[in-house]
Amino acid sequence: MQTQTNQRKLLSALCHGAIFLSSTIVSVSIPIIILLVSEDPVVKANAIESLNFHINLYLYAIIFGILVFVLIGIPLLVLLGVASIVLPIIAIVKVLERPDQPYRYPFIFRLL
């Protein structure tokens, strides 16, 4: 039982921490692989939430990048950069504290 909890913690934290590896396809592929391989419903929920967070970051970056021409995009991009660091750290801490409950990011659209 303890091994299953430890595996759940590890895989859930890896899903949310994948964003720190790179901003390319590598960080997105880790939650996808975990989603396809894992049978645990909590790990699958964390993988889906991590993918939604990635997708939202890319969409916000495109929108804020366009808004740079109106000069409001620069502070929004800075805020997005801070959120892309802080929110996954909070997610990792939460899934390690409560391994039986999937983490849900605030302020994102759930597309998956």
Image (tube, rainbow, N blue to C red):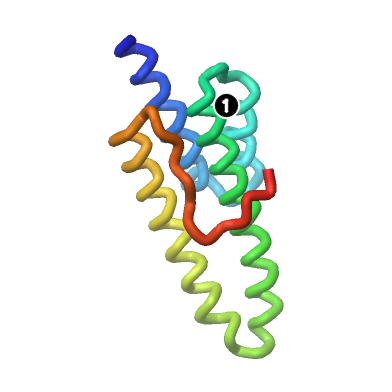
Up-down: is 72 above or below 34? below
Name the image quarter holding residue 39: top right
Name the image quarter holding residue 35: top right
Up-down: is 111 above or below 80? above
Find residue 24 and report its horizontal and vertical position in percent.
Answer: 63, 48
Find residue 89 and report its horizontal and vertical position in percent.
Answer: 37, 49
Q: How crowded is mark 1: few (under 14 residues within 10 Å), some or many (20 or more)?
A: many
Tell me which residue sits at (60%, 89%) in the image: 71
Q: Which quadrant does the C terminus fall into?
A: top right
Tell me which residue sits at (34%, 12%) in the image: 3
Q: Which residue lies furthest to the bottom in this view?
A: 70
Nearer to me, 83 or 52: 52
Tell me which residue sits at (63%, 66%) in the image: 61
Find residue 63 and report its horizontal and vertical position in percent.
Answer: 68, 72
Looking at the rendered structure, the number of numbered marks drawn on it comes to 1
Find residue 51 and report its horizontal and vertical position in percent.
Answer: 61, 43
Tell me which residue sits at (66%, 90%) in the image: 70
Mark 1 secondary-structure assignment: helix
Q: Which amino acid does label 1 sit on?
A: Ile
Name the image quarter holding residue 68: bottom right
Q: Which quadrant does the N terminus fall into?
A: top left
Which residue is disc 1 drawn over? 34
Up-down: is 4 above or below 26? above
